[in-house]
Amino acid sequence: KFAGGGFLRSLSVSVVSILALAVLVSLVTKRVNYSPVTNGGEGVVLHVEVQLPPNWAEDADNITQFGCALNPNGDRSAGEVHSSRIQQPKNSRAIVPCTFALRSTRKNRRISLTIQGAGGSIGPPAGRAWLDVTLPDDWSLELNKPWGQWARGTDAGAVIPSDYQFRYRLESENISRTKDQAEREVRLKERWRQFRSLAPNAPLERYLAAFEPDPDNVAASEIPPEVVAKLAVLVKKNPSGFEEALGSDDREVVRRAVYALSATPQIPREITPALVDAGHQVVSYIDSARDKNLAWANDDADKDALPFLDRWDLALDHAEPPINRADFLAILDDMQKASGKRHSTFRTDLPSRVAMKIDEMTAKRR
């Protein structure tokens, strides 16, 4: 076969086939543009600000959800809304900031903002607007420049069109990350200053406000020792207040209480039953994350559910026994049912991550 050219012929066919496949993959990749956009090897971030119509500016706190999207942008169409940076200038419009890690080299894009509001006097119960933009050919010439001019967006389906204004700028990933970290440090410094300044008889909800996870998702290890010490005294002196917070119908109140307790070195036994029962609110977040009717909003619930589960687990580690094992296992079972079956292929989906966490928690408390 060597002498007759059979081997060389087969090798040639194989090489040609591989080259053809490589060309096809290259063309498909170029078409869908899923690789991160880089400038000299560094990622590129698109920053967007949306100025809300005047009828929203009076009370932007009543807006319950924001979502932003960039299309096309490969596999990362959803952007990150920075709730901590929402500006509400006096006698002016509220401004909502959003960022996107660029994953597509396409020039023509659509930036959209989706709003879910509380309704009432401040505006409609929901809104959506978009702006079609053309990004520059040469990223490097436009990076890290000031904001562009405001441009009026298109209001989706409104009988009386509202005036949404958009503007954007491009920034290198390292500069964007450095700014984000600096702003976060300033916010946390102010957060702990306010906590330390609270009077001993201040309402518990004011103490718990310091443990709101958004927007900074502070790890328990990041909380200053003097804050932990003051929190420990508060838990010891007011266990009934924490029991009440853990039993609240408002899952955000429960979440703040669990986050606070996860940083507490020792949780009195009288709080333990209420802490175990707080796991039902973790189930609530998982339910929201799996609710297809919530559309883009379930992404936020997904991001909330697992950190909440982690903090609940950490708080239980600090709780004085006994922990009612039957109640504990029943809640874990509810979590598993709410999240759905673990996925055998994609181990990073929500059901799989919840299932792995449940396995860990069950083994730890045998």
Image (spheres, rainbow, N blue to C red):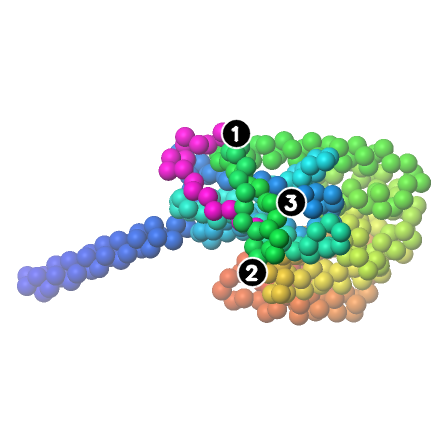
Name the residue at 64% across, 40% down.
Answer: 95
Label 1 secondary element: loop
For the residue pair 67 and 75, the one nearer the viewer reads as: 67
CA distance separating discs 3 and 1: 23 Å
In the displayed structure, 133 sits above or below 18; it is above
In the displayed structure, 303 sits above or below 102; it is below
Residue mark closest to the camera, 2 vs 1: 1
Q: Which mark is residue 146?
A: 1
Q: Earlier in the sequence, mark 3 or mark 2?
A: 3
Relative to 168, is 198 on the left or the right?
A: right
Asked whether the beta carbons under mark 3 and mark 1 sit within 8 Å of each other, the answer is no
Q: Position of residue 84 (x, y in %)?
A: 68, 40
> As drawn, which residue projects farthest toward the front?
160
Relative to 227, is 96 on the left or the right?
A: left
Quadrant for the N terminus, please.
bottom left
Residue linked to disc 2: 349
Part of the protein shown in magenta: 129-146
Asked whether the beta carbons under mark 2 and mark 1 sit within 8 Å of each other, the answer is no
CA distance separating discs 2 and 1: 38 Å
Residue linked to disc 3: 53
Amino acid at dot 3: Pro
For the residue pair 252 and 277, the one nearer the viewer reads as: 252
